[in-house]
Image (spheres, rainbow, N blue to C red):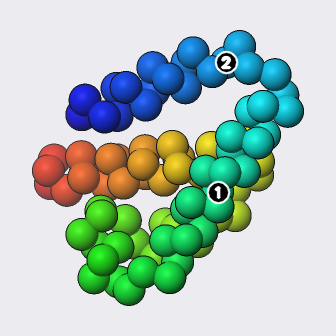
Amino acid sequence: MRDYALTRAHSAEATGLSLISRLIRNWRARRAVTRLESFDDYMLRDIGVTRADVIWASGLPLSHNAALELEERARQRRYRMLKD
């Protein structure tokens, strides 16, 4: 939870970034997410994401930070699992 809050706080600070800076940051995040596609399903499960999640995040437009979106999706899944 602490990492999630820190990431969101950093993201909120980044709203002052220029459009180009934001696109570059999002492009780098997408590259990092795309590297997850080479992981096997067991490793992805340990991280808390599925292959479908990684493919979904890789396909997001550059206006979205793929790493943050993937993290949020995984967090929501964990929350739903705990709730059920």
Q: Are marks 1 and 2 in contact (CB under 8 Å)?
A: no
- Which is nearer the eye, 80 or 23? 23
| Residue pictured at 35% horizontal, 83% vertical | 41
Tell me where residue 15 appears, x and y as whole percent: 67, 18
Tell me where residue 10 appears, x and y as whole percent: 50, 23
Side (left or right) of 27 relative to 67? right
Q: Give the Cα separation between the discs numbered 1 and 2.
A: 18 Å
The quadrant of the image that shows the C terminus is bottom left
Q: Tag 1, which secondary structure? A: helix
| Residue pictured at 66% horizontal, 51% vertical | 28
**Residue 13, quarter of the rendered image:** top right
| Residue pictured at 81% horizontal, 22% vertical | 18
Label 1, on which residue? 30
Tell me where residue 20 appears, x and y as whole percent: 85, 33
Give, as a three-letter code, the residue at label 1. Arg
| Residue pictured at 34% horizontal, 26% vertical | 5
Q: Which circle marks residue 55 in the picture? A: none
Label 2, on which residue? 15
Give, as a three-letter code, the residue at label 2. Thr
